[in-house]
Amino acid sequence: MTATIDQELYRTAVQTFEDLAFLLPIPDEGPAPACPLTWVSVTFRGPFSGRILVGCSEGVLQALAANMLGDSDAPSPTQQLDALREIANVLCGNLLPKIAGTQAIFRMEAPALCEEPPTCTEAQPAACARVCLMEGCAQVSLFLDAPLAELVNRP
C-alpha cells in the first residue's frame, strides 16, 4: 500500500507543478542532488490527520513564482514563498480525496513556512516523492498521525 501512496503522491505533485506553474518533470537520474530546499507544510484534519511537507530548491522557487504570476521579472522572495505555499495547498487538497475518497471531508490549515528543514529525527513519512525539474528539485512528504495500517484497515 505504501508504494501506491508514494506513486499517488508523485503523480499528484507532478500534476500540480504542471498545472499551476507549467513546470515539467525530467527523468530522475540517481541520488538526490545536495541542494538546500525551502520547506512549507500544510496540516490537515479529517478521517485521518497529518501534514504534507513540500520543499523546493531556489531555482524551482523562482520558476514557480514567475510562471504562476505570468511575469518575466524576477519574483521577490515573498512572491516565491507565496507560490510555494499555494503549490503545497493545492497539492494537499488534490491528494487527500485520492487517498480517502471524494466523500471524505478534511480541514486544512493555511500553509506555513518551516523555519527548520525536516530532520531524520522526525516521524517516518507515510509517503515521499522527489520531483526532478529542469529548474531544480522538489521533495514532497506525507506524514500521518496514525500508522498507515490503521488507515488502510478502516471500514
Image: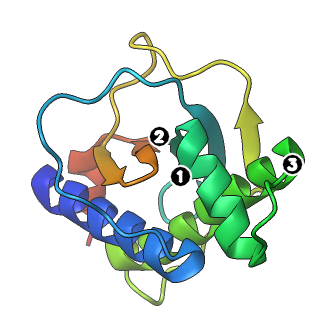
Is residue 95 shown left or right of residue 52? left
Q: Is residue 6 above or below residue 67?
A: above
Q: Earlier in the sequence, mark 3 or mark 2?
A: 3
Quadrant including the C terminus: bottom left
Is residue 130 shown left or right of residue 139? left
Place of residue 132 in the rendered image (x, y in percent of width and height, measured from the top left): 31, 50
Residue 96 in view, yes or no: no
Which labelled disc corresponds to residue 49? 1
Outermost residue to the bottom:
103
Closest to the camera, between mark 1 and mark 3, is: 3
Mark 3: few/some/many CA within 10 Å (<14, 14-19, 20+): few
> How far, Cα to Cα, is label 3 from label 2?
35 Å
Residue at 46% of width from left, 69% of height from top? 23
Tag 2: amino acid: Asp
Badge 1 element: loop
Tell me whether the residue at label 2 lies in contact with that at label 1, contact meaning CB atoms closer than 8 angstroms.
yes
- Which colouring convention does the figure follow? rainbow
Badge 2 element: loop
> How far, Cα to Cα, is label 2 from label 1?
6 Å
**Tag 2 residue:** 145
> How far, Cα to Cα, is label 1 from label 3?
33 Å
Badge 3 element: loop
Q: Earlier in the sequence, mark 1 or mark 3?
A: 1
Mark 1: few/some/many CA within 10 Å (<14, 14-19, 20+): some
Q: Earlier in the sequence, mark 2 or mark 1?
A: 1
Residue 50 in view, yes or no: yes
Closest to the camera, between mark 3 and mark 2, is: 3
Place of residue 102 in the rendered image (x, y in percent of width and height, measured from the top left): 44, 89
Q: Is residue 128 above or below residue 116?
A: below
